[in-house]
Amino acid sequence: MTTDPFALFDSWFAEARSSEINDSNAMALATVDASGQPSVRMVLLKGHGPDGFVFYTNHEGRKAADLAAVPKAALLFHWKSLRRQIRVEGTVTHTTAAESDAYFATRSRDSQLGAWASDQSRPLADRATFEARYEEMQARFAGGDVPRPPHWGGYRVTPHAIEFWQDRAHRLHERRVFTRTADGWREGLLYP
């Protein structure tokens, strides 16, 4: 039994990548706004390690506003085929510009253009308006690389708690929880 939550995450994530049909890196991201109103949505994990869990998004959308107001978040990975889930709670910071640039460069050109065309989370009169903006971006960046928009980048959730939940018969689930301390991680169990 490991007492390193990141080694255990790596093991479970490797199994999920080989068994989940779609988006094994999908995770629910929960935030709250300045008034305490919660919101949750799916995002994709794009990096992880002892320093945290990384995702990328538009910095002008609702989740970015929530994270600016309250820089804390919860993540949930749910792998139904494995009957497992992992809960993460922590503080949120921006990734560096270099990290954001490096990841943006790996995205498909269409996804890069979409990042320029979208006013994420803002009202949209009709789909044709967005498609026209996308075509404008195609023309704007025709024949060249698409740079990362200044309003787009990454976030890192640095965990203070990570829970590993494994389904068991008769709802007698196994719940292992890791809590960050000044000296590292403390491991414990929770009742199902």
Image (tube, grey):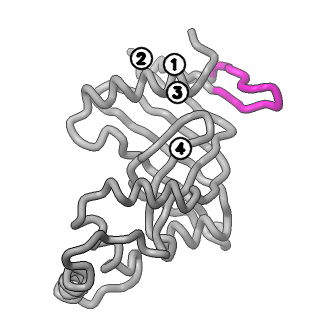
Q: Which residue is mark 3?
A: 164
Q: Quick check: marks 4 and 1 in contact, CB under 8 Å?
A: no
Q: Report the front residue among 96 and 76.
A: 96
x and y, in percent, of residue 118 in the image = 33, 78
Give me the disc on residue 168. 2
Label 1 SS = strand
Looking at the figure, which quarter contains the N terminus? Answer: top right
Q: Quick check: marks 1 and 2 in contact, CB under 8 Å?
A: yes
Between marks 3 and 1 in the image, the one whose residue lies nearer the viewer: 3
Label 2 SS = loop
Q: Report the front residue among 32 and 48.
A: 48
Looking at the figure, which quarter contains the C terminus? Answer: top right
The type of residue carrying mark 1 is Glu
How far apart in space, not on screen, are marks 4 and 2 (Cα)?
27 Å
How far apart in space, not on screen, are marks 2 and 3 (Cα)?
13 Å
Q: Residue at x 27, y 65 (%)?
A: 111
Disc with the residue nearer the chain's start (3 vs 1): 3
How far apart in space, not on screen, are marks 3 and 1 (Cα)?
8 Å
Label 4 SS = strand
x and y, in percent, of residue 8 in the image = 51, 21
Between marks 4 and 2 in the image, the one whose residue lies nearer the viewer: 4
Mark 3, Cα crowd under 10 Å, few <14 / some 14-19 / many 20+, is many
Q: Which residue is mark 4?
A: 53
Quadrant of residue 132 within the rendered picture: bottom left
Decide whether the magenta segment is chiefly helix, strand or loop.
strand
How far apart in space, not on screen, are marks 1 and 2 (Cα)?
7 Å
The type of residue carrying mark 3 is Phe
In the image, residue 188 lies in the stretch drawn in magenta: yes
The type of residue carrying mark 2 is Arg
Q: Quick check: marks 3 and 1 in contact, CB under 8 Å?
A: no
Q: Residue at x 25, y 73 (%)?
A: 144
